[in-house]
Structure formats: structure tokens, C-alpha cells
Image (cartoon, grey):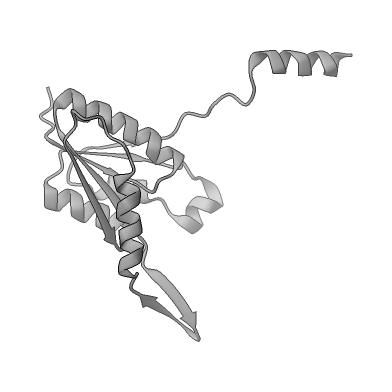
Amino acid sequence: MLNIQTILHPTDYSEHSAYAFRIACSLARDYQAKLVLLHVALRSVTIEGEAAIAPRSEEYFQAEREKLEGISVPTEIRIERQVVEGAPAEEILSAAQTMKADLIVMGTHGRTGLSRLLMGSVAEQVLRKAPCPVLTVRALTPLAEPAEALTSQQAAIDS
């Protein structure tokens, strides 16, 4: 059996992250592991003739910490919450290394084609360089409509 003591869950507050969070909580509960929630704030970029990197304000970080605090976690799970600034993949990898994470559980948007080329894949970068196993989770796609609605639509099409 795996010895999992620390689970890192990076979050961008998306549906994919929320789904991965539920799995991370289940694993943390089952293994009695500490769960670390990590949000990476991108550095803000200001363009005034040239691109420049401007640090985020303390108010911004306070708001991000409050968002993380707002994520409810079952009481039996030991939790730590961190907000850092930087490039997401780099900061996730650095955090995993520093805390000696045994597992990273993260959502993936599953981008393909041009959007993946333009936006990159944080999950892929983490998978390639992580110092521990990585579980990537893509949110389940809900059914578009209930079966009754589909049946009535089909009847309308047939008539």
C-alpha cells in the first residue's frame, strides 16, 4: 500500500479543480494525510509601451486567501492553505518539492489543438517534472438534458 502523508491540490477555482478537490479530500481521508490547497496567482502584466511585470497588492492576496478559506473541508482532514505568486507549473512543482508531497491531485481542462498550443497545459508540465506521482482529473461532463426531454425532442423531429 502507498504511504501517502501529504497531498498537494493546486486549484484555480474551476469546475475541474473542484472535482479534483473532492477526490483529493477522499484520498486525504482514506490515507489520513494532510491536504495542502495551493492557489497560484499569476503575476499581473501592465503594458505601457512595453510589457512590465507588476507585483500584486496585499489586498489581492488577502482576497485570494479568503477564497481558499471559503472552501469547506471535512473536519477529519488536516488542511493547509497557501497562496503564492508566479508561473503556475513552476510554483506547483516548487511547492511539491518543498513540502515533500507524496501525491499531487489536480484538475485538467483537457485542452487540445490550438487552445492547448496557445495556453499550454499546466497539468502536462507538472506531470513531466513532478517529484511525486500526479493524479490528473477532468470533471465529468453532465448529460446535456434529461432523458424525457430528449424523448420529446425526438418525437417533435419525427412528426
> Up-down: is 32 above or below 58?
above
Residue at x 45%, y 39% (from the top left corner) = 15
Q: Is residue 50 left or right of residue 4?
A: right
- Quadrant position of residue 45: bottom left
Is the C terminus in the top left, top right, bottom left or bottom right quadrant? top right
> Up-down: is 35 above or below 87?
above
**Horizontal and vertical percent position of residue 96:** 18, 48
Residue at x 36%, y 76% (from the top left corner) = 54
Is the N terminus in the top left, top right, bottom left or bottom right quadrant? top left
Which residue is farthest right? 159
Figure label count: 0
Q: Is residue 158 left or right of residue 113?
A: right
Q: Nearer the viewer, residue 1 or 151?
A: 151
Q: Nearer the viewer, residue 58 or 7?
A: 58
> Up-down: is 60 above or below 47?
above
**Horizontal and vertical percent position of residue 127:** 29, 44
- Quadrant position of residue 34: top left
Q: Can the viewer see residue 87? A: no
**Horizontal and vertical percent position of residue 128:** 28, 47
Q: Nearer the viewer, residue 54 or 159?
A: 54
Which residue is farthest bottom? 49
Residue at x 15%, y 51% (from the top left corner) = 97
- Quadrant position of residue 88: bottom left
Q: Can the viewer see residue 62? A: yes
**Horizontal and vertical percent position of residue 112:** 51, 45
Residue at x 13%, y 53% (from the top left corner) = 98
